[in-house]
Image (cartoon, rainbow, N blue to C red):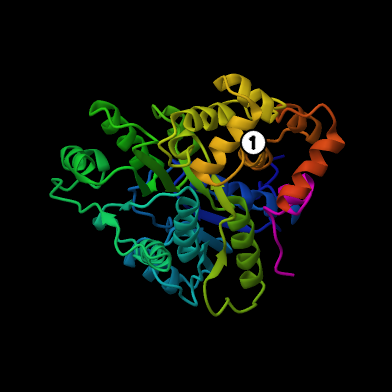
Amino acid sequence: MTVPRSTTRFPDRRQIAVLVQTANDWSRQILLGVGQYAIEQGGWEFYVEPRGFYEEFSLPDTWNGHGLICRLTSEKLSAEIQRRKIPAVNISWLADHQPFAPKVISGEEHCGQLAANFFLEKGFEHFGFVGGAPSLGYSRRTVDAYAQTLRESNISSIHVFEYGPSEGSPHIRAQRQRLKEWIKDVPKPIALLVWSDIIGHELTLICSSIHVDVPHDIAILAIEHDPLISMLSPIPISSIDHQFQKIGRMSAEILDRMIDGFPAPDGPTLIEPIGVIERLSTSTHFTDDLLVREAIAWIHQNSHRPLQVSDVADRVGVSRRVIEQRFKKAINRSPGHEIRDAKVSRIKKLLTNTELSMIEISTHAGFTCQESFSRFFKTAVGVSPTEYRRGSFGSLR
């Protein structure tokens, strides 16, 4: 006897379509957050396909599920969602907040403010911005907030790269010659906020080809984070920590509530970025003191070790008193402060980007005692390592 087969293995589960590119880490981390929330609800069934950044998204005519998480990047998709009356959540900075597709996104203005303050604390006096290609259609909210924060610190202007003709290609490589001339002309040292690790990667290649030092001549901080692209760059790219998985979880929870008949939020749900994931592309405080530069670079390269100020002094061949005096004069902070910040940055990266246990993370951060590790982190950050890791998640209920 033939047993009829259900069209789905779990007919009572939510049927959710995901129209998000899977080619970058930004979107994959958001999808991880969506998946984590779905598992906690007993499991959802997803319609998802491998997709690139420049693909146009659309729902198959044959798909008839409960809801949609998407990058709302076209009028066609917007019309399709409204025509089919499908509850939807938009996780892209593109498009405005809509009742039929509310936005859950990283706070654009906060990104700009965070980047400006990060660079100001390092002592830079010149600032620049390399955005995404105008054809991509992103708003100016991030760069406007970046510029406004700098103006509040008496920085009157920033150097903004202007895109030229590109034969229809939005890729930054089409601007290579124009970028090369722009880099030669900008005052140095300069702090550059760039749209993505892809742009940061291209800039490191250009700087290397014209003998411009990264990070001491040009420091590079990316808004969009992709650790793979960063790793493949000649110099790893620092980037903003957007709490991507929290964005995914919140998107899934809002969609879940909309499917149950609750109204969409009145405005965008903003998940504020929590800091900078610092790598070598910004790993300096601007100073003419080469000894201090060398010491800072060595501290960040060895943040996995149980460092003391005396270790730094030994490395650069001076006494502890001299190294502390040189740091104070050059960057108005102590080598101990630099050691702490480098270690905190490393721990945050391990907590958010790995599944290592607390014992393993404490070892990777140079601690021999887990209690000392937890006490150090809580004193520096204000929450325990466990609370910080859980802080990537949230709830509306």
Q: Is residue 70 above or below residue 46?
A: below
Left or right, 138 with reference to 332 = left
Please tell me which residue lies in front, 9 or 379.
379
Specify the quadrant of the image occupied by residue 298. top right
| Drawn side of residue 162 relative to residue 381, left or right | left
Number of labels in the image equals: 1
Residue pictured at 57% horizontal, 19% vertical: 317
Residue at 16%, 42% (x, y): give it: 178
Quick one: label 1, few (<14), some, or many (20+) residues within 10 Å?
many
Q: What's drawn in magenta, residue-wise?
A: 382-397
Q: Secondary structure at mark 1?
A: helix
Q: Is residue 70 left or right of residue 368?
A: left
* x and y percentages locating residue 142 in the rendered image: 40, 62
**Foreground residue among 59 and 139:** 139
Q: Identify the residue shown where x is 74% and y is 56%.
A: 41
Q: Is residue 387 magenta?
A: yes
Q: Position of residue 16 (x, y in %)?
A: 58, 57
The image shows residue 281, relative to residue 113, as above or below, that is above
Q: Looking at the image, is 51 positioned above or below residue 207? A: below
Image check: 153 left or right of 69?
left
For the N terminus, the quadrant is top right
Placement of the C terminus among the 4 image quadrants? bottom right
Hey, what amino acid is under mark 1? Answer: Ile
Q: Would you say the magenta stretch is mainly helix, strand or loop?
A: loop
Asked whether 99 falls inside the magenta stretch, the response is no
Q: Quadrant of residue 365?
A: top right
Q: Horizontal and vertical percent for residue 103?
A: 50, 67
The residue beneath circle 1 is 339
Query: Can see residue 204?
Result: yes
Residue 130 shows up from this direction: no
